[in-house]
Image: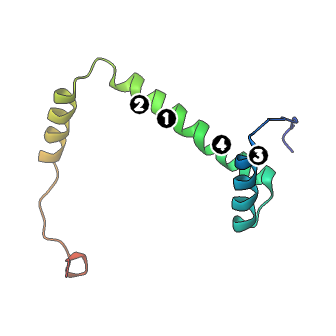
Amino acid sequence: MAKSNVLTIRVPCDLKERIVSVAREQRVSINQLAMYIFSKEIGNLEIKEKIARYQKGYSKEKIIDDFDVVMTEVKKREAPDRDELD
């Protein structure tokens, strides 16, 4: 089992009420909800930073041009009937 630590945070009363409400709606503990939200948001921040590092040095025009080059390699084909919009 992974080692764990205790983290105490202070939040405004109205935020705590919202956290409790969401945890009840999701039928999870406040701890489980907090771990999920922290993990998800930290992951989002990490991927945003990774994308920013990747895009550094690329202009919007270069990214779009590269995308267009890739799309020329995609074979054109008809969409199956099940993919048609009504």
From the viewer's side, name the closer residue of 73 and 45: 45
Residue type, numbered disc 3: Cys
Residue type, numbered disc 2: Ile
Residue type, numbered disc 1: Ile
Residue type, numbered disc 4: Ser
Callout 2: few (<14), some (14-19), or many (20+) C-alpha neighbours within 10 Å? few
Q: Position of residue 37 (x, y in %)?
A: 65, 47
Which residue is rendered at x = 14% and y = 56% of the image? 75
| Marked residue nearer the N-terminal end (4 or 2) | 4
Which residue of the protein is positioned furthest toward the top in this rendering? 57
Which label sits on residue 58?
A: none
Q: Is residue 36 above or below residue 63?
A: below
Q: Quadrant of residue 8?
A: top right
Which residue is rendered at x = 41% and y = 30% of the image? 51
**C-alpha separation, residue under disc 3 versus residue under disc 4:** 23 Å
Q: Which residue is mark 3?
A: 13
Q: Which residue is mark 4?
A: 39
Q: Secondary structure at mark 3?
A: helix
For the C terminus, the quadrant is bottom left
Q: Is residue 55 above or below residue 34?
A: above
Which label sits on residue 51?
A: 2
Callout 4: few (<14), some (14-19), or many (20+) C-alpha neighbours within 10 Å? few
Callout 1: few (<14), some (14-19), or many (20+) C-alpha neighbours within 10 Å? few
Pointers 4 and 1 in contact (C-beta within 8 Å): no
Q: Secondary structure at mark 2?
A: helix
Q: How many marks?
A: 4
Q: Which residue is mark 1?
A: 47
